[in-house]
Image (spheres, rainbow, N blue to C red):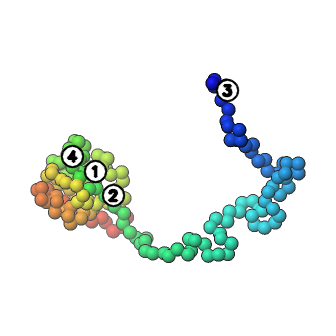
Amino acid sequence: MKLHELRDNPGATRPRKRIGRGPGSGTGKTGGRGIKGQKSRSGVAIAGYEGGQMPLYQRLPKRGFNSRNRKRYAVVNLGILQKFIDAGKLDAKQEITEDALLAAGVIRRKLDGVRILAKGALSAKVRLSVTGASKAAVAAVEQVGGTLNVTSKPAAE
């Protein structure tokens, strides 16, 4: 078999239906849309409409509540912190601030602040200064002889 002999299987490709090209085409005039009505017009999408029946998205129960004033934090686990210290991207002797975490690539962006969580193990003695931390994270940092300073952000932003 040669490249110029390659063909699709018979019936695998069908010619494009050319809508609105006169009565001889079979899809002229109304172009397969029928006569009158909303769906015969252009620019109409009836997404989610179920013919007068209550749509599925309205039938499903709604639960929960999302506060408009909620704070979103960039989350850093202690295990990740230790990995960056071991790789030499963070200096354990210096105070580790949110800006240092951003510069080292531990977090992508600060959002409303940085929050430290206790997942993973920390063996380096570090001085941390961040917006938030879990109680377990504070305990884990103090256990290895470090300090975790939680600062609160100014109210006006």
Q: Position of residue 121 (x, y in %)?
A: 19, 54
Q: Position of residue 87 (x, y in %)?
A: 23, 42
Residue drawn at 24 percent across, 65 percent down: 134
Residue drawn at 15 percent across, 47 percent down: 93
Mark 2 or 3, nearer chain start = 3
* In contact (CB < 8 Å): disc 1 and disc 2: yes
In the displayed image of the protein, which residue is found farthest to the right?
Answer: 23
Q: Real-space Cα distance between discs 1 and 4?
A: 11 Å
Q: Real-space Cα distance between discs 1 and 2?
A: 10 Å
Mark 1 or 2, nearer chain start = 2
Q: Position of residue 14 (x, y in %)?
A: 73, 43
Q: Disc 4 vs disc 3: which is toward the camera? A: 3
Residue identified by numbered label 2:
74
Q: Real-space Cα distance between discs 2 and 4?
A: 18 Å
Per the image, label 3 sits on a secondary structure element best described as helix
Residue identified by numbered label 3:
5
Per the image, label 1 sits on a secondary structure element best described as helix
Residue identified by numbered label 4:
85
Per the image, label 2 sits on a secondary structure element best described as strand
Residue 114, disc = none
The amino acid pointed to by label 1 is Leu
In the depicted view, which residue is nearer to us: 32 or 94? 32
Mark 1 or 3, nearer chain start = 3
Residue 101, disc = 1
Q: Real-space Cα distance between discs 4 and 3?
A: 61 Å
Q: Is residue 23 something one can see in this rendering?
A: yes
Locate the C terminus by quadrant: bottom left
The amino acid pointed to by label 4 is Ile
Residue drawn at 15 percent across, 50 percent down: 124
Disc 4 packing (10 Å; few <14; some 14–19; many ≥20):
some
